Image: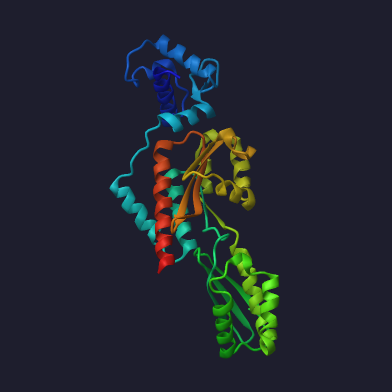
Amino acid sequence: MTERKQKILAAVVESYIRTGEPVGSKNLMGELDFSVSSATIRNEMADLAEMGYLEQPHTSAGRVPTTLGYRYYIDKLMNKMELNEADCKSITKTVSSGSGDPEQLLEKAGEVIANLTNCAAITTMPAGDKATVRRAEIVPVSNRTAMIVLLTSAGTLKSKACRSDMPITPQTVERFYNVCASHFVGRPLEEIGTVMLQTLVASLGEYALEMSPFFVALADLANDALSSDVLLEGQSNLFNHRELGGNVLELMEFLRKGDPLAKLIAGGTDDVDIKIGTENEYKQLANSSVIISHYDINGERSGALGIIGPTRLNYAKLIPYMQFVSGLVGKILTETLDE
């Protein structure tokens, strides 16, 4: 790939991203920082097509980037834009409005990136695989019904209604609190299972029957908190992209399925992972791009924010947005959990 080919490829990608129209050699003459004839540009574009970086959608049309062309552009040629101060302040204000509750915070973050990018936005709650029990409470609702509430060290908040065969008294609430403080708080979620509960209930003596339903419910919540919930915002944005065409409904159906979506956003090891078109393992995403930016809590990888849209995205602009929002989410969650 010569320097001239690189500049022509970058110009084609940026022109196509901007206009959505196939790019011809004459269109590029005014966009390059060097002077060559239209015929020379046309020859170079033909070479780039043979190399797999460009393709010609119609016989008489110009060229458009292929998946390989986008990949080369993003990895080697793209200059990322910088967010201005006004954008940073606006994003921070909106996302921070949900800072009291991790789920609300991530919902706000999802709304922000959906609006900024005009794509579908996906976010995951902090991962629970390394989390511990931070707090557990019982909140009486009626004489024999209570809400069991679990807060993990990852900031995940779970609750569940639980019915008892015995009246729930202030002494019941105090016993639950004391047992949780000595047996659950600080314990990894993955350790809270059947064997641990059997041992615990056996040690409760005369209170075993009274306490059992509550601790079974708590164990269910701990198991639920081990998996990262996936939040989805802005699905209707996909209808704004004509490039997706008849694939939109199939893509919308894919987004409604939690398991593949969770697997999709959990993958990757880089701070920002970009999968373009056929690089995605799911056929429903063959005409789409996925940009995922991970966030850290207290220096550890904890969750991610992502967008799904057409391959014709303004990567230079959107990637910095994703990095800023994910960094902000990680910062706020770290501060919240340190309080």
Which of 170/251 is in front? 170
Q: Locate residue 87, reporting x and y percent.
A: 33, 48
Q: Is 257 placed above or below 139 here?
A: above
Q: Percent position (x, y) of residue 30?
A: 33, 19
Q: Give the residue drawn at x 50%, y 51%.
A: 304
- Look at the picture and state if 129 lies above or below 72: below
Residue at x 67%, y 69% (from the top left corner): 193
> Which one is in front, 147 or 209?
209
- Say which of 292 and 63 sits in front: 292
Residue positioned 40% across, 69% down in the render:
339
Q: Is residue 15 left or right of residue 239?
A: left
Residue at the (37%, 33%) spot, across then down: 79
How many numbered marks, from 0 up? 0
276 shown above or below 192: above
Residue 14 position by quadrant: top left
Position of residue 194 measured from the top left corner of the image (x, y, whole percent)? 70, 71
Quarter holding residue 8: top left
Q: Is residue 66 above or below residue 96?
A: above
Q: Residue furthest left?
A: 85
Relative horizontal placement of residue 178, taking residue 314 as reference (left or right)? right
Look at the image and name its color scheme. Answer: rainbow
The image quadrant of residue 159 is bottom right
The N terminus: image quadrant: top left
- Find residue 266 and report its horizontal and vertical position in percent: 56, 49
